[in-house]
Image (spheres, helix red, strand yellow):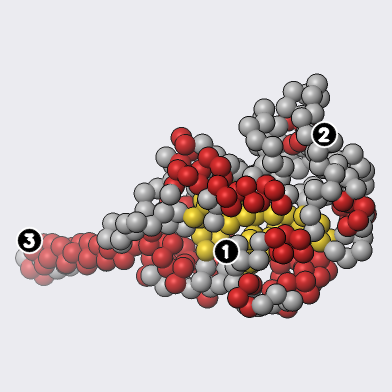
Amino acid sequence: MTERETPGAPPSRRRRRWAAAGIVLLLVAGGVWANNTSLFGSTAGKAPRVLAHRGLSQTFDASGVGNDTCTAERIHPPEHDHLENTLSGMRAAFDAGADAVELDVHITADGDFAVFHDWEVGCRTDGSGTTRDHTMAELKELDIGYGYTPDGGRTHPFRGQGKGALPSLGEVLAEFPTEPLLIHVKSDDPAEGEALADRLARLPDRRLGEVTVYGGDAPVAALRDRMPGLRVMSKEIMLDCLLAYEAVGWTGHVPAACSGVQLHIPEGYAPWLWGWPSTFVARMEAVDTRVVLVAGSGGFSEGFDTRESLERVPDGFTGTIWTNRADRIAPLVR
């Protein structure tokens, strides 16, 4: 075959071009790997933080739990005397070594904020109706230990012990004036976000630095409009941050949507994040964002609650671990 009949470049030239392209691809891949590996970051002596979900509380069987499940009716046999969202349960969590406590709030009929998880009071208490149907004084008359049972209703170990134990948000802030708190707005009412902003705006800036608020898109957006410097989280905020980060995070750049917020990352999704674990956490901390690792899919209060579950937390993770058993977990990570 003559040279004129030979299509394209000579084989040797094509091979050189393919070799050069391969080298470029390897260099790019190596650069992306080096930019996102956690192998070279030093996390020696840095332990994860511990976030106590609802303080120290009674845990329950989460299998088959839905939005309307009364979890007080399926608790495990009690190992301690504390109930969720109470001052004593929060203090017990901090005393056990928790770095922060999560609590739930509902607005009341008289415009206060009750620290209580359920929309309806009938599951845990001897009352009826919604939390917002009642004034704060009326809620304090309820026995919040009334409905707990570990054996299908045969016994109620906390009945009669919870009257007056439902705190207001003001009481929590007074009891824990410096401790980090994560406030969960349980409704999807933007007016509740505005009312919470009015309440939190009374706090000094130094105290607000240790307060984070999360919840539905609407109330969190309303609160953020009023208090743009407060650390917050919602589903919309999470998606805006993580979708942008997945697009550009391989370069090491952290999008503006990820700045000054909190991220609750399910353990199954976490390994897909650029730089996971320590490089990712360091990048987020550099823009004043906190990273919380939650167990499983992150649904229905899944936490790292046993010694065995801690083995799933990756080496080098220095963010925050979500747990329902701070009394077990905090001593293990210190």
Q: Earlier in the sequence, mark 1 or mark 3?
A: 3
Q: Give residue 57's position: percent from left, percent from top.
A: 67, 42
The reply, left or right, for residue 187 in relation to residue 19 is right
Residue drawn 57% across the image and 50% down it: 95
Label 1 crowd (10 A; few <14 / some 14-19 / many >=20): many
Q: Can residue 69 be seen in this view?
A: yes
- Between the residue at mark 2 and the residue at mark 1, the CA separation in whole angstroms equals 37 Å
Q: Which of marks 3 and 2 is nearer the N terminus?
A: 3
The amino acid sitting under disc 2 is: Arg
Q: Which residue lies furthest to the left in this view?
A: 2
The reply, left or right, for residue 119 in relation to residue 300 is right
Q: Can residue 5 be seen in this view?
A: no
Residue 222 to residue 331: above or below: below
The amino acid sitting under disc 3 is: Met
Considering depth in this image, is 237 or 310 the residue closer to the camera?
310
Residue drawn 45% across the image and 54% down it: 48
Residue under label 3, please give it.
Answer: 1
Nearer the observer: mark 3 or 2; the answer is 2
Residue under label 1, please give it.
Answer: 262
Residue 278 occupies quadrant: bottom left
Considering depth in this image, is 174 or 296 the residue closer to the camera?
174
The amino acid sitting under disc 1 is: Gln
Nearer the observer: mark 2 or 1; the answer is 2
Considering depth in this image, is 322 or 220 the residue closer to the camera?
322
Residue drawn 85% across the image and 44% down it: 163
Q: How many labels does the image show?
A: 3
Q: Give residue 6's position: percent from left, percent from top.
A: 12, 65
Q: Give residue 103's position: percent from left, percent from top.
A: 69, 54
Nearer the observer: mark 1 or 3; the answer is 1
Task: Describe the element under mark 3 as helix, strand or loop.
Answer: loop
Residue 60 occupies quadrant: top right
